[in-house]
Image: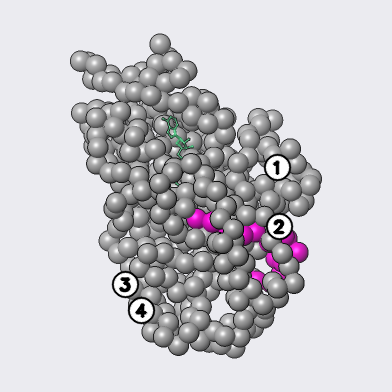
Amino acid sequence: MAAADIVIIGGGIVGCSVFFELERLGYDCILLEKNENLISEASSGNSGMLHSGFDAPVNSLELHCIKRCMERVFSTFDQLGVPYNENGSIMVAWSPDQVPKLEEIQASSLAKGVTNVYHMSAPELYRKEPYLSRQADGALWIPGETVLEPCVYGLLLAHHARKNGAKILTGCEVQGHEVDSYGRSTVETTCGPITARVVINCAGLYGDKVQQMAGVDTFSIKPRKGQYAVFGSSTGHLIKSSILPVPTEKTKGIIVFKTVHNNLIVGPTAEDVESRQRAAIDATITKRLVDIGRQTVPELTSFSPVGHYTGVRPATEYKDYQIKSYADRNWITVGGIRSTGVSASLGIAEYVATLMRNDLKAEPTRGSTRTVESSDWNLLPSGFLSVDGQLYGVSHPITLFGLKESGRNSRL
Ligand SMILES: Cc1cc2nc3c(=O)[nH]c(=O)nc-3n(C[C@H](O)[C@H](O)[C@H](O)COP(=O)(O)OP(=O)(O)OC[C@H]3O[C@@H](n4cnc5c(N)ncnc54)[C@H](O)[C@@H]3O)c2cc1C
């Protein structure tokens, strides 16, 4: 029977971050992913934005993890060589009745300790964004918000742990979990049983089903679809920042943003759905997204989208993250990371490391913490990321659209 110290279930952005962090701290880890590719489910259908936390619920674990992540994510990007663009976001009130809401958002951000949210005057707005519709009634400037290469980030986190000796098994589905009378865990998988000291459930859209394998039933996944319209890189000059609407209780709303590949994207929607699988493109929504894009940036009328994609958020019945440890089962669940898994990635991983030490009394097997080092990587037109000669399949549409247009090996 195979053995590992720490088994991490799920190679989305959350699992890859936890894998990276625990290996860095000295734990001996194995990452199990049921699909052929890492970053292939919820984590491959997002906007690839780092949100600064200004709109995260007050006193939430989500806000805590985003703030902790923000403190070290940029140095980690630089150390690993992850492409990002600190372009900031501008939240625009498109009607006079939304203007007081901007003031409320600014005040609540300050109360949460997210201080970099500023009022922006109309001349400042149009100096920065000359192509924006002239219908704006007010704006907030949020410089901390950033776009990054979300697939390269996740894969480089995982690769860093792997190149230092940790193992990754893809095409390996976890199907059961048992704790024997000596307190040792065994994970049943499609690639055979694996014994472990601690098991960490980072199964995203299947987090509730996987935790039931450990006899825990504390939340249910309520999948929430998001759809996007993607414009070609020739539209990239039309905006400098990400253009956010004023959010509602239910959703952050449709954003117009530019990826690190220079594609201009409009989305995501927020629709409750039954299925956890990647959702189909809905033509009515496509039209609505294109209309919103053109209302926001009228010059987009001269361009047609080059494609569309969808993603599914692992939402639950709760607003906050569902991260809990179960010492009697050697188990940690990291679930319900609904819409900020990238932004909070390293904060979530740090929080899990704290649970390992404090609740599970699981100390690292290696004494020293590892320094983060860059890798030699290239995006290949064939849809792979080559890192230090190791190939990783790419599933994220942001990366695939970028590759399609550049048609060449790219480090951006
Ligand atoms: C439309 C949309 C927009 C978003 N925009 C942003 C954004 O701009 N910024 C941001 O920070 N966040 C954003 N998010 C949220 C972010 O994408 C999620 O928080 C994050 O992807 C959740 O990651 P995860 O690792 O928990 O889940 P997943 O990515 O789903 O990973 C879980 C993995 O576990 C694997 N797995 C499941 N069951 C098993 C099993 N039994 N055995 C082995 N493996 C298993 C799955 O195959 C999967 O790969 C967005 C999400 C969506 C959908």
Crowding near pointer 2: few (<14 within 10 Å), some, many (20+)?
few
Residue under the point 34% across and 34% down: 209
Amino acid at circle 1 = Leu
Determine which of the numbered discs, if any, sits on residue 111 in the image. Answer: 3
Q: Earlier in the sequence, mark 1 or mark 3?
A: 3
For numbered disc 4, what is the local secondary structure? helix
Query: Residue under circle 2?
Result: 306
Q: Quadrant of residue 178?
A: top left
- Tell which tag, 1 or 3, sits nearer the viewer: 1
C-alpha gap between disc 2 and disc 3:
41 Å
Asked if residue 32 can be seen in this view, the reply is: yes
For the residue with label 2, is its CB less than 8 Å from the closest atom of ligand 1? no
The mark found on residue 104 in the picture is 4
Report the side of 24 relative to 288 (left or right): left
Q: Is residue 20 left or right of residue 377?
A: left
Q: Are marks 2 and 4 in contact (CB under 8 Å)?
A: no
Q: Is mark 3 within 8 Å of ligand 1?
A: no
Q: Which label was assigned to residue 379? A: 1
> How far apart are the two marked residues, 2 and 4, measured between alpha carbons?
37 Å
**Residue 402 at x, y = what percent?**
70, 51
Toward the right, the furthest residue is 408
Cα separation between marks 1 and 4 = 43 Å
Q: Residue at x 47, y 67 (%)?
A: 253
| For the residues bearing labels 2 and 3, Cβ distance under 8 angstroms | no
- Of pointers 2 and 4, the one earlier in the residue sequence: 4
Nearest the eye: 398 or 184: 398
Label 1 vs 2, first from the N-terminus: 2
Residue 69 in view (yes/no): no
For the residues marked 1 and 2, what is the alpha-carbon distance in whole angstroms? Answer: 20 Å
Numbered disc 3: secondary structure: helix
Residue at left offset 59%, top offset 88%: 123
Report if the CB atoms under discs 1 and 2 are less than 8 Å apart. Answer: no
